[in-house]
Image (tube, helix red, strand yellow):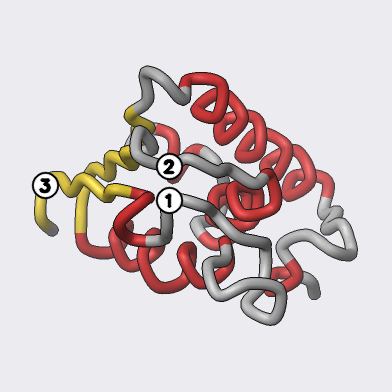
Amino acid sequence: MNNTITINLAKEADEFLGARYPEESDVNGEEFRENVLLPAFKKYKNIIIDIEDVIGFTWSFLDEAFGGSVWAMGGIGNIELRLSISATKNYEWKQRIQEYMEEAEEARKKGLIPEKRWRKFAK
């Protein structure tokens, strides 16, 4: 396993983040999670997500990408120690990403998957 990777969200996704699912937007949280974020967790010990160059954030993209990762990785404990968000000017979105992961962890612990969120992990 390699040590660290920095993923520039604006370059890997777009400066303007899209929606939650592929049918809603070409730039979407589900594909970012499946094609970029989860493969990075398999290959690297530490992941830094640089959100500085993103101009337009959407809650649905971030919730699906990062909240969905909590489900995919079997809990927030498998993510928190390995994932860092690099943000100075977009600090409030760094906080929101953490909140989305915490919300997903609470739902995961209770076995609750909201109908429109994290659909891939519904049983």
- In which quarter of the view is residue 120 placed? bottom right
The residue carrying mark 3 is: 3
| Percent x, y of residue 122 | 78, 71
* Residue in the picture at 38% in, 38% down: 51
**Secondary structure found at label 2:** loop
Q: Nearer the viewer, residue 62 or 38?
A: 62
Residue type of the residue flagged with mark 3: Asn
Residue type of the residue flagged with mark 2: Val
> The N terminus is located in which quarter?
bottom left
Judge left or right: residue 123 versus residue 3: right
**Secondary structure found at label 3:** strand
| Residue at the extreme bottom of the image, as rendered | 23
* Residue in the picture at 63% in, 56% down: 64
| Percent x, y of residue 73 | 49, 57
> The C terminus is located in which quarter?
bottom right
- In which quarter of the view is residue 11 placed? bottom left
User: Which sits earlier in the primary sequence, circle 2 or circle 1?
Assistant: 1
| Percent x, y of residue 27 | 53, 67
* Residue in the picture at 37% in, 25% down: 87
The residue carrying mark 1 is: 15
Residue type of the residue flagged with mark 1: Glu
Label total for image: 3
Q: Spatial distance from mark 1 to mark 3, Cα to Cα?
A: 27 Å
Q: Spatial distance from mark 2 to mark 1, Cα to Cα?
A: 4 Å
Instruction: Check residue 54 in the rendering and tell me which mark sits there, or answer none.
Output: 2
